[in-house]
Image (cartoon, rainbow, N blue to C red):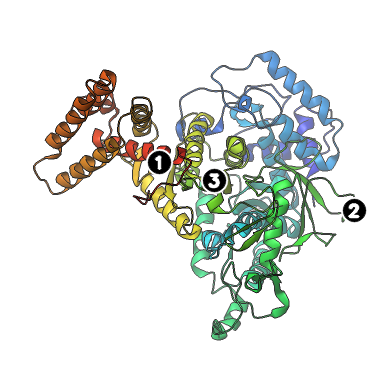
């Protein structure tokens, strides 16, 4: 693969970095730099500048934070801080950059720059753009100008059908496949981007964005650009169809040619429209499908089906038995390959990719071979093999952040519900939900960044530059592909990251641990984005045997409901979590509900209040909702007062403090408490009901003996 090394070295040379000599025209490089940043740029000796977070400056954010100059990694020291770094700290990082670059091999130069220059600003004129992204995109544009006709194209690609493909798994063996299939989708999107780079002899520096099942790549314009791209598109589309039929689609589009005078937002807008049109015309562009369509039927009857995906298997030679003793464990060979991919992922530290086969490698349909391993294999690898380290930044080794490479697994062979599981297999969802003979509930969480499409199209900053797009995308990846793993480490036995990338995630696990993870994700994302971007999510709590496919849909609906969250003035703020079917603001209702939940638990555990208190709260809150809906006399008020007063009176002699606490809960339903100043549209009693449901689940989960089921919580 082309590594664009001469352009990177020449840019570094003009900046006085790395001790390199420029072999290129400075005018060309300055034109590329100006185009990359969308403004006049003169390449001069580099001046160390503290880097401001690009996620803070989108949407014209006004707060001021800084990154500390350091090498790339995954730790809390990488979060933005209010205090600017000292000039000495900046100079030290630049000195380390200069020292280390001189000994880096040409093919690893871009990797080393990401490692050493991600936390330095591009310069005084662009303090919120990382030096790494500036050099990377400038090198790509310089190559396009040098090899093309003076104009560029922007190519976009994505995989459609991901949600259905990932979650439409029917059997009790779904856990075996889910993680491997999730990584396969990441692998496939990665191969699509690499195929485009290889086809047009481009380098990784040409990739503006690659995450979440999609990518955007800069290409030099030429007379044959559209023809060559159309041929590439047809070939790749046929290959995806050949493997996945109509279950997955490759959507590919190419922008019109543009030059430095064209507004970047117009280029993006045009490309997004073309990609959306591809989604509507994906069948009409597939020549093979046109031939197959008249006979495109399922055979039904006794035709063998994959026991996990439910897909028909017409060729007996591509079947595999997951359990030799169970004839009902038959799956397609490709399904088994994905299962093995998931197993390899758990202990993998390296991801090796090549254009030709090698021992133990997994082939994709696009002509790439992949191996996940805990060490670099000693076998002879193809000359074009790329070895990437997983979730460990390394200046001498290409690396990749991936959300969820480790997951809860069985520590010994097990047989559950008649199905054999080997040591290292992903835990079943009912096992994730809790220990045997305890109250088990599964939490399913889906989250994504609010209004990110509008951020990219309208609010990305005062200059819609390619460097800015690359920087914003990479910073989102750091959080969703890298930092999320750190958040989930303490829940390594109970929480499974099914998918995380781009700006969204899907997590399954023990309900209370998943809820804790959701709170930590929001808190950390708020810090990472300097409160300038927000995130919403939906969390559903389900029985341990609930079908994961249906659970994912319910979590998706809950996420959609969170996006409708409004304050008391009716302003749609999003920035919420839908919990127990109620959209709650992270900073408005959630803190109130948590405080009330803790108060209820204290009453029940430490003050020995009866569990019937929770039931009374639920009944009166339901009465409030019904009476408000039908505009009836609010009888709930005196019923609540009577019930809780009686309960408090019963405790008067035994425990005065408990009686007083119950009266405080009662009176708060009518008082103008602090929570009312938060502009919440919820009545106190409604929030108390949500807290009571939460407290009830925590109490039942803490028990060691399964109770009689009295609700579908």
Residue position marked by numbered label 3 in the rendering = 435
Could you classify mark 3 by the number of other residues whose Cα lies within 10 Å: few (under 14), some (14-19), or many (20 or more)? Answer: few
**Closer to us: mark 3 or mark 1?**
3
Q: Which residue occupies the extreme front position in the image?
A: 654
- Dividing the picture into quadrants, the one containing residue 619 is top left
Task: Give the secondary structure at mark 3.
Answer: loop
Q: Residue at x 67, y 27 (%)?
A: 120
Alpha carbons under labels 2 and 3: distance apart: 42 Å
Residue position marked by numbered label 2 in the rendering = 379
Task: Give the secondary structure at mark 1.
Answer: helix
Q: Residue 641 appears at what percent x and percent y?
A: 15, 31
Nearest to the observer: residue 527 or residue 267? 527
Q: Residue 148 appears at what percent x and percent y?
A: 72, 53
Residue position marked by numbered label 1 in the rendering = 697
Is residue 155 something that shows in the picture? no
- Dividing the picture into quadrants, the one containing residue 679 is top left
- Dividing the picture into quadrants, the one containing residue 89 is top right
Q: Is residue 546 left or right of residue 187?
A: left
Could you classify mark 2 by the number of other residues whose Cα lies within 10 Å: few (under 14), some (14-19), or many (20 or more)? Answer: few
The disc, 2 or 3, on the residue closer to the chain's N-terminal end is 2
The disc, 3 or 1, on the residue closer to the chain's N-terminal end is 3
């Amino acid at each position: 693969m082309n590594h664009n090394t001469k352009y990177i070295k020449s840019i570094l040379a003009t900046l006085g970095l790395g001790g390199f000599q420029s072999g290129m025209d400075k005018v060309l490089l300055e034109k590329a730099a100006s185009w990359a940043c969308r403004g006049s740029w003169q390449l001069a000796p580099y001046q160390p500048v503290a880097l401001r977070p690009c996620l803070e400056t989108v949407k014209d954010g006004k707060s001021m934070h800084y990154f500390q100059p350091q090498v790339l990694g995954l730790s809390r020291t990488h979060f933005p801080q209010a205090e600017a770094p000292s000039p000495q700290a900046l100079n030290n990082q630049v000195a380390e950059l200069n020292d280390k670059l001189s000994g880096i091999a040409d093919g690893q130069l871009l990797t080393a720059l990401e490692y050493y220059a991600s936390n330095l600003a591009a310069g005084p004129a662009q303090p919120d753009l990382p030096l790494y992204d500036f050099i990377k995109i400038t090198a790509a544009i310089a190559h396009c100008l040098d090899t093309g006709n003076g104009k560029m194209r922007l190519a976009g690609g994505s995989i459609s059908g991901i949600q259905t493909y990932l979650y439409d798994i029917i059997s009790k063996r779904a856990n075996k496949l889910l993680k491997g299939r999730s990584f396969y989708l990441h692998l496939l999107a990665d191969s699509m981007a690499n195929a485009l780079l290889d086809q047009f002899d481009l380098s990784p520096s040409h990739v503006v964005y690659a995450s979440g099942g999609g990518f955007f790549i800069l290409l030099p314009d030429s007379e044959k650009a559209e023809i060559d791209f159309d041929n590439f598109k047809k070939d790749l589309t046929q290959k995806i169809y050949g493997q996945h039929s109509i279950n997955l689609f490759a959507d590919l589009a190419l922008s019109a040619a543009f030059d430095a005078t064209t507004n970047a937002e117009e280029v993006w807008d045009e490309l997004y429209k073309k990609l959306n049109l591809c989604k509507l015309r994906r069948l009409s562009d597939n020549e093979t499908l046109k031939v197959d369509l008249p006979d495109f039927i399922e055979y039904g009857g006794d035709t063998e089906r994959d026991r996990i995906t439910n897909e028909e298997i017409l060729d007996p030679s591509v079947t595999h038995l997951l359990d030799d003793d169970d004839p009902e464990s038959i799956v397609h060979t490709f399904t088994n390959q994905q299962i093995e991919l998931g197993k390899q992922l758990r202990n993998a530290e390296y991801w090796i990719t090549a254009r030709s086969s090698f021992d133990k490698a997994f082939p994709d349909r696009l002509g790439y071979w992949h191996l996940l391993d805990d060490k670099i294999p000693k076998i002879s690898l193809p000359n074009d093999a790329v070895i990437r380290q997983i979730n460990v930044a390394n200046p001498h080794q290409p690396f990749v952040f991936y959300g969820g490479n480790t997951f809860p697994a069985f520590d010994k062979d097990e047989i559950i519900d008649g199905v054999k599981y080997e040591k290292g297999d992903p835990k079943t969802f009912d096992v994730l939900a809790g220990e045997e003979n305890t109250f088990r509930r599964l939490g399913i969480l889906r989250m994504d960044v609010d209004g990110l499409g509008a951020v990219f199209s309208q609010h990305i900053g005062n200059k819609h530059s390619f460097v800015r797009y690359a920087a914003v995308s990479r910073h989102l990846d750091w959080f969703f592909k890298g930092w999320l793993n750190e958040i989930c480490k303490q829940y390594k036995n109970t929480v499974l990251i099914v998918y995380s990338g781009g700006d969204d995630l899907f997590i399954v696990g023990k309900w209370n641990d998943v809820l804790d993870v959701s709170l930590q994700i929001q808190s950390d994302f708020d810090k990472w984005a300097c409160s300038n971007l927000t995130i919403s999510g939906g969390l559903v709590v389900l029985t341990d045997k609930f079908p994961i496919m249906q659970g994912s849909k319910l979590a998706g609906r809950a996420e959609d409901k969170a996006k409708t969250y409004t304050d008391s003035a009716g302003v749609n703020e999003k920035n919420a979590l839908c919990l127990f079917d109620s959209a709650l603001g992270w900073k408005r209702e959630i803190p109130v509900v948590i405080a009330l939940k803790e108060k209820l638990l204290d009453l029940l555990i430490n003050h020995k209040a009866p569990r019937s208190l929770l039931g009374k709260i639920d009944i009166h809150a339901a009465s409030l909702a019904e009476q408000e809906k039908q505009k009836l006399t609010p009888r709930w008020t005196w019923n609540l007062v009577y019930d809780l007063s009686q309960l408090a009176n019963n405790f008067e002699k035994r425990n005065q403090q408990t009686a007083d606490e119950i009266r405080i809960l009662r009176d708060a339903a009518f008082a103008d408490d602090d929570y009312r100043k938060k502009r919440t549209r919820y009545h106190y009693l409604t929030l108390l009901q949500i807290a009571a449901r939460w407290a009830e689940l925590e109490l039942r989960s803490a028990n060691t003996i399964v109770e009689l089921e009295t609700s579908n919580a």
